[in-house]
Amino acid sequence: MKLLLDLGNTRLKWALAGNDGWSARGAVAWDADVAAALQQAWSSLQAPQRVLGASVVDAEREALLQQAVGSVFARDIAWVRTPAQACGVRNAYAEPQRLGVDRFLAMVAAHAAGHAPCVLAGIGTALTLDALAADGQHLGGLIAPGPLLMQQSLLGATARVRPERPGLIRDLADNTADAVASGCWQAVAALVERFARHIGAQSLQAAPRLLLDGGDADLLLPLLDVPAEVAADSVLRGLLVWADTYPAQASF
């Protein structure tokens, strides 16, 4: 049994994995009482043999998770950090550690599932885009604000754009709230489409599979004019591939 932890910008996602897949799973937002929520969720679970974590957050929140895991299960967390290559995926970054481990593990999950060549789009606080060739070579990617962060940035930088309610996503908006929401969501959709089309034609020599993950993936999917699918929990699935590939924590 393995406990897998995905520490994202907005929330923590976790899954307890056995031989037959997830036996338990959950998520906790960082603005909640994380320690109490995990104590309640984990108190009745079988203790895992290993705990693996992937983090894009600060050391303070990593320490909070270590304390929670130690308190409930008396285990240490083996933190997976981004390597130059692992699990059949080769990192394109000249400084491998600067690629977010969430992006690397999403590629690991896609490669292990036989989805490459593909484009991976993480739709969350940030929008991340990565291209993965059939042989596991990461070709590089892009980072931009996610749709909600884009809206917050716009409102924070303007004096008169002050919607009185959350906006709806429309093709043509006749009020400020809908105009802001629609413009930001459609901008993200357009960048995802452009990246998939250009990378497919220029670098992958094929129409790549487009995989979406992240908290806002389901909302973005119907806005796209290219074939796409949601590949949920890609970081957790990548952690499981890592755990199965390296029975003991590997050093890279």
Image (cartoon, rainbow, N blue to C red):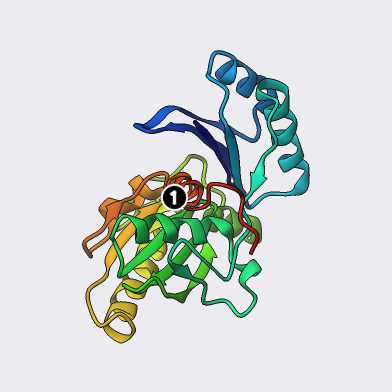
Label 1: which secondary element: helix
Relative to 84, is 21 on the left or the right? Answer: left
Image x and y of residue 217, in percent: 38, 49
Q: Answer whether residue 103 is visible to the viewer in this image.
A: yes
Image x and y of residue 105, in percent: 49, 56
Q: Quadrant of residue 149?
A: bottom right
Image x and y of residue 95, in percent: 65, 76
Q: Which amino acid does label 1 sit on?
A: Val
- The residue lying toward the viewer, choosing from 247 and 64, is 247
Q: How crowded is mark 1: few (under 14 residues within 10 Å), some or many (20 or more)?
A: some
Residue at point 70% right, 36% down? 76
Could you tell me which quadrant the C terminus lies in? bottom right
- The residue lying toward the viewer, choosing from 56 and 244, is 244
Q: In which quarter of the image is residue 106?
A: bottom left
Figure check: 227 above or below 11: below
- The residue lying toward the viewer, choosing from 245 and 241, is 245
Image x and y of residue 109, in percent: 40, 54
User: Residue lying farthest top?
Assistant: 44
Q: Mark 1 points at which residue?
A: 241
Relative to 246, is 219 on the left or the right? Answer: left
Relative to 19, is 33 on the left or the right? Answer: right
User: Residue lying farthest front?
Assistant: 247
Residue at point 64% right, 35% down? 30
